[in-house]
Amino acid sequence: MTLPRSRFRIVLVLGLLSALGPLTIDMYLPSLPAITDNLATTAAAVQLTLTGTLFGLAFGQLLIGPLSDAFGRRRPLLAGTAVHVISSALCVVAPGVVSLGILRVLQGLGAAAASVVAMAMVRDLFSDRDAARIFSRLMLVIGVAPVLAPTIGGLVLNWTSWRGVFVVLAFAGAAIMAVSAWVLPETLPVAKRRNEGLVGTARDYGRLLTDRVYVGLILVAGLAMAALFAYVSGSSYVFQDGYDLNEQQFALIFAGGAIGLIGATQFNVRLLLRWTPQQIMSVALLAGVGSGAALVLTAVTGFGGLAGILVPLGLVLATVGLAMPNAPALALSRHGEAAGTAAALLGAVQFGVGALAAPVVGLLGVGAVAMAVVVAGGMVAATAVFFLVVRPHQLPAADPEPVAALAH
Protein backbone atom coordinates (compact mmCIF):
# COMPACT_ATOMS: atom_id res chain seq x y z
CA MET A 1 0.00 0.00 0.00
CA THR A 2 1.46 3.36 -1.07
CA LEU A 3 0.32 6.26 1.09
CA PRO A 4 0.00 9.82 -0.19
CA ARG A 5 2.26 12.22 1.66
CA SER A 6 -0.58 13.54 3.85
CA ARG A 7 -1.62 10.01 4.84
CA PHE A 8 2.00 9.13 5.62
CA ARG A 9 2.22 12.09 8.00
CA ILE A 10 -1.02 11.02 9.67
CA VAL A 11 0.24 7.46 10.20
CA LEU A 12 3.52 8.83 11.58
CA VAL A 13 1.66 10.94 14.14
CA LEU A 14 -0.59 8.01 15.04
CA GLY A 15 2.61 6.12 15.82
CA LEU A 16 3.73 8.91 18.16
CA LEU A 17 0.34 8.76 19.91
CA SER A 18 0.71 4.99 20.32
CA ALA A 19 4.10 5.52 21.98
CA LEU A 20 2.82 7.83 24.71
CA GLY A 21 1.37 5.03 26.84
CA PRO A 22 4.50 2.82 26.84
CA LEU A 23 6.70 5.84 27.53
CA THR A 24 4.50 6.87 30.45
CA ILE A 25 4.58 3.38 31.95
CA ASP A 26 8.22 2.47 31.47
CA MET A 27 10.34 5.62 31.47
CA TYR A 28 10.28 5.99 35.26
CA LEU A 29 11.01 2.31 36.06
CA PRO A 30 14.74 2.96 36.72
CA SER A 31 13.65 5.68 39.17
CA LEU A 32 11.65 3.42 41.50
CA PRO A 33 14.43 2.88 44.09
CA ALA A 34 15.26 6.60 44.10
CA ILE A 35 11.59 7.52 44.54
CA THR A 36 11.33 5.08 47.46
CA ASP A 37 14.28 6.71 49.22
CA ASN A 38 13.44 10.31 48.38
CA LEU A 39 9.82 10.10 49.49
CA ALA A 40 10.70 7.95 52.54
CA THR A 41 8.18 5.27 51.65
CA THR A 42 8.14 1.56 50.84
CA ALA A 43 8.82 -0.24 47.59
CA ALA A 44 5.29 -1.66 47.65
CA ALA A 45 3.80 1.84 47.90
CA VAL A 46 5.88 3.05 44.97
CA GLN A 47 4.86 0.00 42.93
CA LEU A 48 1.25 1.08 43.47
CA THR A 49 2.01 4.25 41.50
CA LEU A 50 2.69 1.97 38.52
CA THR A 51 -0.56 0.11 39.18
CA GLY A 52 -2.33 3.48 39.18
CA THR A 53 -0.94 4.27 35.74
CA LEU A 54 -2.15 0.94 34.40
CA PHE A 55 -5.59 1.51 35.91
CA GLY A 56 -5.77 4.96 34.32
CA LEU A 57 -4.84 3.53 30.94
CA ALA A 58 -7.49 0.79 31.13
CA PHE A 59 -10.33 2.91 32.56
CA GLY A 60 -9.43 5.90 30.41
CA GLN A 61 -9.94 3.95 27.22
CA LEU A 62 -13.43 2.90 28.28
CA LEU A 63 -14.25 6.53 29.06
CA ILE A 64 -12.63 8.31 26.14
CA GLY A 65 -13.61 5.88 23.38
CA PRO A 66 -17.35 6.72 23.55
CA LEU A 67 -16.51 10.44 23.89
CA SER A 68 -14.58 10.25 20.62
CA ASP A 69 -17.63 8.70 18.95
CA ALA A 70 -19.82 11.52 20.26
CA PHE A 71 -17.60 14.59 19.80
CA GLY A 72 -15.18 13.53 17.09
CA ARG A 73 -11.59 12.36 17.43
CA ARG A 74 -9.63 15.61 17.81
CA ARG A 75 -11.26 17.19 20.87
CA PRO A 76 -11.00 14.15 23.20
CA LEU A 77 -7.48 13.52 21.92
CA LEU A 78 -6.24 17.05 22.59
CA ALA A 79 -8.03 17.27 25.94
CA GLY A 80 -6.60 13.91 27.03
CA THR A 81 -3.04 14.77 26.05
CA ALA A 82 -3.42 18.09 27.88
CA VAL A 83 -4.36 16.14 31.02
CA HIS A 84 -1.24 14.04 30.51
CA VAL A 85 0.98 17.13 30.20
CA ILE A 86 -0.48 18.84 33.28
CA SER A 87 -0.33 15.72 35.47
CA SER A 88 3.25 15.03 34.32
CA ALA A 89 4.24 18.58 35.32
CA LEU A 90 2.57 18.19 38.71
CA CYS A 91 4.44 14.88 39.28
CA VAL A 92 7.62 16.96 39.22
CA VAL A 93 6.56 18.67 42.46
CA ALA A 94 4.63 15.79 44.07
CA PRO A 95 5.31 15.99 47.84
CA GLY A 96 4.53 12.38 48.69
CA VAL A 97 3.76 8.94 47.33
CA VAL A 98 -0.02 9.36 47.67
CA SER A 99 -0.11 12.50 45.53
CA LEU A 100 2.30 10.89 43.07
CA GLY A 101 0.01 7.87 42.78
CA ILE A 102 -3.04 10.03 42.09
CA LEU A 103 -1.18 11.99 39.46
CA ARG A 104 0.03 8.78 37.83
CA VAL A 105 -3.62 7.70 37.45
CA LEU A 106 -4.29 10.99 35.66
CA GLN A 107 -1.23 10.43 33.48
CA GLY A 108 -2.65 7.06 32.49
CA LEU A 109 -6.02 8.63 31.67
CA GLY A 110 -4.32 11.16 29.40
CA ALA A 111 -2.21 8.52 27.66
CA ALA A 112 -5.36 6.44 27.14
CA ALA A 113 -6.79 9.22 24.97
CA ALA A 114 -3.79 8.99 22.66
CA SER A 115 -4.03 5.20 22.41
CA VAL A 116 -7.75 4.80 21.83
CA VAL A 117 -8.07 7.73 19.39
CA ALA A 118 -5.14 6.42 17.36
CA MET A 119 -6.89 3.05 16.96
CA ALA A 120 -10.21 4.67 16.12
CA MET A 121 -8.61 6.89 13.49
CA VAL A 122 -7.06 3.85 11.83
CA ARG A 123 -10.53 2.33 11.64
CA ASP A 124 -11.97 5.58 10.25
CA LEU A 125 -9.41 5.79 7.46
CA PHE A 126 -8.51 2.24 6.46
CA SER A 127 -10.35 -0.93 5.57
CA ASP A 128 -9.75 -4.43 6.88
CA ARG A 129 -6.48 -5.51 5.24
CA ASP A 130 -5.06 -1.99 5.01
CA ALA A 131 -5.90 -1.47 8.69
CA ALA A 132 -3.88 -4.59 9.54
CA ARG A 133 -0.93 -3.11 7.66
CA ILE A 134 -1.21 0.16 9.56
CA PHE A 135 -1.49 -1.66 12.89
CA SER A 136 1.68 -3.52 11.95
CA ARG A 137 3.45 -0.19 11.50
CA LEU A 138 2.09 1.06 14.81
CA MET A 139 3.32 -2.12 16.47
CA LEU A 140 6.82 -1.10 15.42
CA VAL A 141 6.49 1.98 17.62
CA ILE A 142 4.65 0.17 20.41
CA GLY A 143 7.35 -2.50 20.44
CA VAL A 144 10.29 -0.10 20.40
CA ALA A 145 8.95 2.36 22.99
CA PRO A 146 8.97 0.01 26.04
CA VAL A 147 12.53 -1.07 25.19
CA LEU A 148 13.85 2.48 24.79
CA ALA A 149 11.85 4.10 27.60
CA PRO A 150 13.80 2.65 30.57
CA THR A 151 17.05 3.51 28.79
CA ILE A 152 15.91 7.10 28.33
CA GLY A 153 14.84 7.18 31.97
CA GLY A 154 18.25 5.90 33.05
CA LEU A 155 20.01 8.57 30.97
CA VAL A 156 17.87 11.27 32.55
CA LEU A 157 18.85 9.99 36.00
CA ASN A 158 22.51 10.48 35.10
CA TRP A 159 22.09 14.25 35.10
CA THR A 160 19.05 14.93 37.28
CA SER A 161 16.78 13.35 39.89
CA TRP A 162 13.74 11.15 39.36
CA ARG A 163 11.62 14.29 39.06
CA GLY A 164 13.46 15.11 35.84
CA VAL A 165 11.90 12.01 34.24
CA PHE A 166 8.48 13.64 34.60
CA VAL A 167 9.81 16.85 33.09
CA VAL A 168 10.77 14.82 30.02
CA LEU A 169 7.34 13.15 29.97
CA ALA A 170 5.63 16.55 30.20
CA PHE A 171 7.63 17.89 27.25
CA ALA A 172 7.02 14.68 25.27
CA GLY A 173 3.27 14.94 25.86
CA ALA A 174 3.26 18.61 24.89
CA ALA A 175 5.20 17.91 21.70
CA ILE A 176 2.85 15.07 20.73
CA MET A 177 -0.18 17.26 21.45
CA ALA A 178 1.20 20.09 19.30
CA VAL A 179 2.04 17.80 16.38
CA SER A 180 -1.36 16.13 16.61
CA ALA A 181 -3.16 19.48 16.56
CA TRP A 182 -1.15 20.52 13.50
CA VAL A 183 -1.20 17.32 11.44
CA LEU A 184 -4.25 15.25 12.36
CA PRO A 185 -7.54 16.14 10.70
CA GLU A 186 -10.93 15.24 12.08
CA THR A 187 -11.64 11.75 10.73
CA LEU A 188 -15.19 11.31 12.05
CA PRO A 189 -17.73 13.44 10.15
CA VAL A 190 -20.45 15.14 12.18
CA ALA A 191 -23.10 13.03 10.46
CA LYS A 192 -21.53 9.84 11.84
CA ARG A 193 -21.17 10.97 15.44
CA ARG A 194 -23.19 9.30 18.17
CA ASN A 195 -24.60 11.80 20.66
CA GLU A 196 -26.81 9.49 22.68
CA GLY A 197 -25.38 10.05 26.17
CA LEU A 198 -24.89 7.37 28.78
CA VAL A 199 -27.79 5.30 27.50
CA GLY A 200 -26.32 5.23 24.03
CA THR A 201 -22.87 4.37 25.38
CA ALA A 202 -24.28 1.51 27.43
CA ARG A 203 -26.20 0.33 24.36
CA ASP A 204 -23.03 0.41 22.26
CA TYR A 205 -21.05 -1.57 24.83
CA GLY A 206 -23.92 -4.04 25.11
CA ARG A 207 -24.02 -4.53 21.35
CA LEU A 208 -20.27 -5.06 21.23
CA LEU A 209 -20.39 -7.63 24.01
CA THR A 210 -23.06 -9.61 22.18
CA ASP A 211 -20.96 -9.85 19.03
CA ARG A 212 -19.35 -13.27 19.41
CA VAL A 213 -16.66 -12.68 16.80
CA TYR A 214 -15.68 -9.26 18.15
CA VAL A 215 -15.49 -10.52 21.74
CA GLY A 216 -13.47 -13.50 20.61
CA LEU A 217 -11.00 -11.32 18.70
CA ILE A 218 -10.40 -8.92 21.60
CA LEU A 219 -9.88 -11.92 23.90
CA VAL A 220 -7.35 -13.34 21.42
CA ALA A 221 -5.55 -9.98 21.45
CA GLY A 222 -5.57 -9.92 25.26
CA LEU A 223 -4.36 -13.50 25.64
CA ALA A 224 -1.55 -12.93 23.14
CA MET A 225 -0.61 -9.87 25.16
CA ALA A 226 -0.67 -12.03 28.30
CA ALA A 227 1.94 -14.32 26.76
CA LEU A 228 4.07 -11.26 26.01
CA PHE A 229 3.62 -9.80 29.50
CA ALA A 230 4.55 -13.13 31.07
CA TYR A 231 7.85 -12.97 29.21
CA VAL A 232 8.46 -9.32 30.11
CA SER A 233 7.68 -9.78 33.81
CA GLY A 234 9.59 -13.05 34.25
CA SER A 235 12.55 -12.72 31.93
CA SER A 236 14.86 -10.77 34.25
CA TYR A 237 14.47 -13.37 37.00
CA VAL A 238 14.87 -16.28 34.58
CA PHE A 239 17.98 -15.03 32.82
CA GLN A 240 19.73 -13.10 35.59
CA ASP A 241 18.93 -15.34 38.55
CA GLY A 242 18.43 -18.65 36.78
CA TYR A 243 21.21 -18.42 34.20
CA ASP A 244 23.52 -15.96 36.02
CA LEU A 245 23.59 -13.40 33.22
CA ASN A 246 24.70 -9.89 34.07
CA GLU A 247 22.66 -6.77 33.30
CA GLN A 248 24.35 -6.16 29.94
CA GLN A 249 23.85 -9.74 28.80
CA PHE A 250 20.22 -9.66 29.86
CA ALA A 251 19.73 -6.35 28.02
CA LEU A 252 21.07 -7.93 24.83
CA ILE A 253 18.72 -10.91 25.14
CA PHE A 254 15.77 -8.64 25.89
CA ALA A 255 16.63 -6.46 22.91
CA GLY A 256 16.87 -9.58 20.74
CA GLY A 257 13.37 -10.63 21.79
CA ALA A 258 12.06 -7.16 21.02
CA ILE A 259 13.70 -7.23 17.59
CA GLY A 260 12.08 -10.60 16.85
CA LEU A 261 8.66 -9.36 17.95
CA ILE A 262 8.94 -6.12 16.00
CA GLY A 263 10.36 -7.89 12.95
CA ALA A 264 7.36 -10.20 12.87
CA THR A 265 4.94 -7.26 12.95
CA GLN A 266 6.71 -5.75 9.96
CA PHE A 267 6.88 -9.06 8.09
CA ASN A 268 3.13 -9.20 8.59
CA VAL A 269 2.83 -6.30 6.12
CA ARG A 270 4.44 -8.47 3.45
CA LEU A 271 2.27 -11.47 4.29
CA LEU A 272 -0.88 -9.35 3.92
CA LEU A 273 -0.07 -8.91 0.24
CA ARG A 274 -0.99 -12.58 -0.28
CA TRP A 275 -3.09 -13.72 2.67
CA THR A 276 -5.96 -12.39 4.75
CA PRO A 277 -5.50 -11.44 8.43
CA GLN A 278 -7.47 -14.49 9.57
CA GLN A 279 -5.30 -16.84 7.51
CA ILE A 280 -2.12 -15.36 8.97
CA MET A 281 -3.51 -15.57 12.51
CA SER A 282 -4.55 -19.19 12.06
CA VAL A 283 -1.04 -20.31 11.16
CA ALA A 284 0.68 -17.98 13.66
CA LEU A 285 -1.39 -19.09 16.64
CA LEU A 286 -0.93 -22.78 15.89
CA ALA A 287 2.81 -22.19 15.56
CA GLY A 288 2.68 -20.32 18.86
CA VAL A 289 1.12 -23.30 20.59
CA GLY A 290 3.82 -25.61 19.25
CA SER A 291 6.60 -23.21 20.23
CA GLY A 292 5.03 -22.72 23.66
CA ALA A 293 4.92 -26.47 24.23
CA ALA A 294 8.59 -26.72 23.29
CA LEU A 295 9.38 -23.88 25.70
CA VAL A 296 7.66 -25.67 28.58
CA LEU A 297 9.48 -28.90 27.73
CA THR A 298 12.92 -27.28 27.70
CA ALA A 299 12.16 -25.30 30.87
CA VAL A 300 11.10 -28.42 32.77
CA THR A 301 13.88 -30.70 31.52
CA GLY A 302 16.67 -28.14 31.16
CA PHE A 303 17.39 -29.55 27.71
CA GLY A 304 19.64 -27.27 25.66
CA GLY A 305 20.44 -24.94 28.54
CA LEU A 306 20.04 -21.25 27.75
CA ALA A 307 19.64 -21.88 24.02
CA GLY A 308 16.89 -24.39 24.79
CA ILE A 309 14.89 -21.53 26.32
CA LEU A 310 15.80 -18.80 23.87
CA VAL A 311 14.93 -20.58 20.62
CA PRO A 312 11.31 -21.55 21.39
CA LEU A 313 10.80 -18.29 23.28
CA GLY A 314 11.91 -16.32 20.22
CA LEU A 315 9.48 -18.29 18.07
CA VAL A 316 6.62 -17.56 20.47
CA LEU A 317 7.40 -13.85 20.40
CA ALA A 318 7.39 -13.91 16.60
CA THR A 319 3.95 -15.53 16.53
CA VAL A 320 2.67 -12.93 18.99
CA GLY A 321 4.04 -10.27 16.64
CA LEU A 322 1.95 -11.74 13.83
CA ALA A 323 -1.23 -12.04 15.89
CA MET A 324 -1.26 -8.64 17.58
CA PRO A 325 -1.76 -6.39 14.50
CA ASN A 326 -4.32 -8.64 12.82
CA ALA A 327 -6.68 -9.24 15.75
CA PRO A 328 -7.42 -5.51 16.28
CA ALA A 329 -7.84 -4.95 12.55
CA LEU A 330 -10.43 -7.73 12.28
CA ALA A 331 -12.20 -6.69 15.48
CA LEU A 332 -12.53 -3.01 14.58
CA SER A 333 -13.62 -3.79 11.02
CA ARG A 334 -16.91 -5.10 12.45
CA HIS A 335 -17.98 -1.86 14.16
CA GLY A 336 -17.06 1.17 12.11
CA GLU A 337 -20.22 2.95 13.33
CA ALA A 338 -18.80 3.02 16.88
CA ALA A 339 -15.08 2.70 16.24
CA GLY A 340 -14.05 4.72 19.30
CA THR A 341 -16.10 2.58 21.68
CA ALA A 342 -14.95 -0.60 19.96
CA ALA A 343 -11.31 0.50 20.16
CA ALA A 344 -11.78 1.40 23.83
CA LEU A 345 -13.11 -2.02 24.78
CA LEU A 346 -10.42 -3.70 22.71
CA GLY A 347 -7.67 -1.72 24.42
CA ALA A 348 -9.07 -2.22 27.92
CA VAL A 349 -9.49 -5.98 27.48
CA GLN A 350 -6.15 -6.40 25.75
CA PHE A 351 -4.40 -4.42 28.44
CA GLY A 352 -6.37 -5.90 31.37
CA VAL A 353 -6.05 -9.55 30.37
CA GLY A 354 -2.41 -9.06 29.45
CA ALA A 355 -1.60 -7.41 32.76
CA LEU A 356 -2.89 -10.45 34.68
CA ALA A 357 0.04 -12.49 33.41
CA ALA A 358 2.64 -10.79 35.63
CA PRO A 359 1.13 -11.74 39.01
CA VAL A 360 0.40 -15.26 37.75
CA VAL A 361 4.08 -15.74 36.92
CA GLY A 362 4.92 -14.52 40.41
CA LEU A 363 2.44 -16.86 42.07
CA LEU A 364 3.93 -19.82 40.19
CA GLY A 365 7.41 -19.03 41.43
CA VAL A 366 8.92 -16.64 38.85
CA GLY A 367 11.50 -19.09 37.39
CA ALA A 368 11.82 -20.53 33.89
CA VAL A 369 9.05 -23.09 34.35
CA ALA A 370 6.62 -20.47 35.67
CA MET A 371 7.34 -18.10 32.81
CA ALA A 372 7.12 -20.88 30.22
CA VAL A 373 3.81 -22.21 31.56
CA VAL A 374 2.14 -18.78 31.48
CA VAL A 375 3.56 -17.93 28.05
CA ALA A 376 2.39 -21.25 26.62
CA GLY A 377 -0.93 -21.01 28.45
CA GLY A 378 -1.62 -17.62 26.90
CA MET A 379 -0.96 -18.99 23.42
CA VAL A 380 -3.08 -22.10 23.97
CA ALA A 381 -5.97 -20.03 25.30
CA ALA A 382 -5.70 -17.50 22.45
CA THR A 383 -5.70 -20.30 19.88
CA ALA A 384 -8.67 -22.05 21.47
CA VAL A 385 -10.70 -18.83 21.52
CA PHE A 386 -9.76 -18.06 17.92
CA PHE A 387 -10.84 -21.41 16.49
CA LEU A 388 -13.77 -22.15 18.81
CA VAL A 389 -15.27 -18.69 19.31
CA VAL A 390 -14.10 -16.52 16.39
CA ARG A 391 -14.23 -19.45 13.90
CA PRO A 392 -11.97 -17.93 11.23
CA HIS A 393 -13.30 -20.14 8.45
CA GLN A 394 -16.65 -18.34 8.78
CA LEU A 395 -15.21 -14.84 8.42
CA PRO A 396 -15.60 -13.11 5.03
CA ALA A 397 -12.48 -13.24 2.89
CA ALA A 398 -13.04 -9.90 1.16
CA ASP A 399 -12.26 -6.55 2.70
CA PRO A 400 -15.11 -4.13 3.32
CA GLU A 401 -15.02 -0.78 1.57
CA PRO A 402 -12.93 1.95 3.21
CA VAL A 403 -14.97 3.58 5.91
CA ALA A 404 -14.34 7.28 5.68
CA ALA A 405 -12.62 10.04 3.85
CA LEU A 406 -10.97 12.79 5.84
CA ALA A 407 -13.52 15.01 7.52
CA HIS A 408 -12.89 18.72 7.74
Image: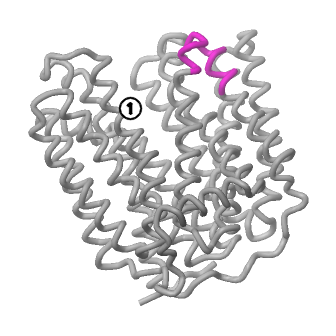
Q: Position of residue 136 (x, y in %)?
A: 59, 60
In the image, taking residue 298 as reference, residue 348 lies left or right, namely: left
- Residue 364 sits inside the magenta stretch: yes
Q: Is residue 190 above or below residue 285?
A: below
Residue at the farthest bottom position: 408
Indicate left or right for 181 with 314 as reference: left
Where on the picture, by quarter, is residue 157? top left
303 vs 123, nearest the viewer: 123
Residue 322 in sight from this viewpoint: no
> Where does the magenta region start and end?
360-374
Colour convention of the picture: one colour
How many other residues sit within 10 Å of disc 1, few (<14), some (14-19) or many (≥20)?
A: some
Residue 98 x, y percent position in the rendering: 21, 29
Q: Left or right: 401 with respect to 255? A: right
Give the farthest residue toward the right. Answer: 393
Residue displayed at 42% across by 41% down: 147
Point 74% across, 58% down: residue: 211
The amino acid type of the residue labelled 1 equals Thr
Please state which of residues 304 and 369 is positioned toward the viewer in this rendering: 369
Q: Residue at x 49, y 80 (%)?
A: 188
Q: Is residue 13 magenta?
A: no
Residue on which disc 1 sits = 51
Does 36 appear above or below 84? above
Helix or strand or loop: what does disc 1 sit on? helix
Query: Eyeballing the image, is 376 above or below 125?
Result: above
